[in-house]
Structure formats: structure tokens, C-alpha cells
Amino acid sequence: MLLSSCPSSFESVVTCYKTGLEVAKNLTYIEEHIMKKLQQGFTLIELMIVVAIIGILAAVAIPAYQDYTFKAKFAEVVAVSSAYKTAVAICAQELGTVTGCDIETNGIPATQATTHVASIAVANGTITVTPTSTTNAASTLILIPTLGVGATTWAKTGSGCLTAQGSAPILCKL
């Protein structure tokens, strides 16, 4: 109720003013009541639903993350083998065969160990890279060269990385 709509007599103005105070008190009560409702927080069931959703997401994310970390570590195994693949290809090109392309001969470097590579062996062009236990030692990478016209192709036949080894996923593909 607006005071400008009140009549001009004194008694009417007083009545109008009292009515305005009552309306203001009611509005204040309503505002306080609504604010208390808004500030109550979450109910127990709402919190339980949130915890359940987080649990489901974690159940999916943790195995995927573990697979990712295995594959990321195995990428170092593949990267280290690249230098040996190049050396064996050059050796095979110079000799005309892979026979005699062994480690520390004909330009093929000595074995090198890294954080995720335990050792590298090269015998007659076949490269065997053994990962450390941080990656999964059973997931060996075996690269067998095949000399073609103008190119050397590599097969991963017999590699331990082609199958799941313990908790490690399949780390390489044919």
C-alpha cells in the first residue's frame, strides 16, 4: 500500500501508516523465511548421489589411466628401437643381407639402458628390446627385418607386447 494513495485526513493517514508497517513486517518475515530455506545446504540424499557419481567415474577412469601410463612408458621402448632399426637397415643395405648385422658390429650401436628399457639385443638383424619392470619386462618388443626392393619392412612376430601381460594391456600392434 502506497502512502500517496491514503486519504488526506489525519486519522486516515495514521491508519494507512500502520497498515504500511504491518505490510513491511510481513515482507521482512517472508524474506527471512525464504533466506533460511535457501541457506539450509544440501540434503543427505543429494550428497549421497554426488558421492555415487564420483565413485562410478573413478571406477571407469582408474583402469583407463593405468592403461595410458603403460602405453606411455612403452613409447620409450619403441622410440629407442628406432635408432637400431635405422642402423640395421643401413647394415643390411651395405651387406646385402641381414646376416652379420649384430650389436656392436657394422655400425650397430651397443645396448643402452634407459628408465623404461632394460636392454637391447641385435642378432642377424633381429632387434629385441626388453623393457624394465617399470614398464612390464614380459612385454618384449621383437622386430624382425625383411629386405625388399628399396625398403626394409619390420614384423613384430613373437613380441610379448602383442598380448596382455599380467596387468599390462596390449602395448603394440602388428
Image (tube, helix red, strand yellow):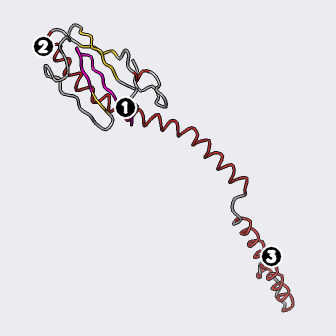
- Nearest to viewer (mark 3 / mark 2): 2
Dot 1, crowdedness within 10 Å: few (<14), some or many (≥20)? Answer: many
Q: What is the distance, in whole Å, between disc 1 and disc 2 at their CAs?
A: 31 Å
Q: Specify start and end residues of the magenta stretch as a single range.
A: 120-133
Going by the numbered disc 1, the residue's amino acid type is Phe
- Nearest to viewer (mark 3 / mark 1): 1
Res 157 → quadrant? top left
Sequence-first disc among 1 and 2: 1
Dot 3, crowdedness within 10 Å: few (<14), some or many (≥20)? Answer: few
Query: SS at mark 1?
Result: helix
Residue for badge 1: 74
Sequence-first disc among 3 and 1: 3
Q: How many marks?
A: 3
**98 to the left or right of 7:** left
Residue 10 position, x and y percent, is: 84, 92
Res 158 → quadrant? top left
Residue 156 position, x and y percent, is: 35, 17
Residue 151 position, x and y percent, is: 23, 12
Q: Is residue 163 above or below residue 6?
A: above
Query: SS at mark 2?
Result: helix
- At horizontal 39% and vertical 34% (from top left) the residue drawn is 135
* Residue 132 is a magenta residue: yes
Q: Is residue 59 above or below residue 98?
A: below
The N terminus, quarter of image: bottom right
Residue for badge 3: 26
- At horizontal 31% and vertical 32% (from top left) the residue drawn is 117
- At horizontal 37% and vertical 31% (from top left) the residue drawn is 74
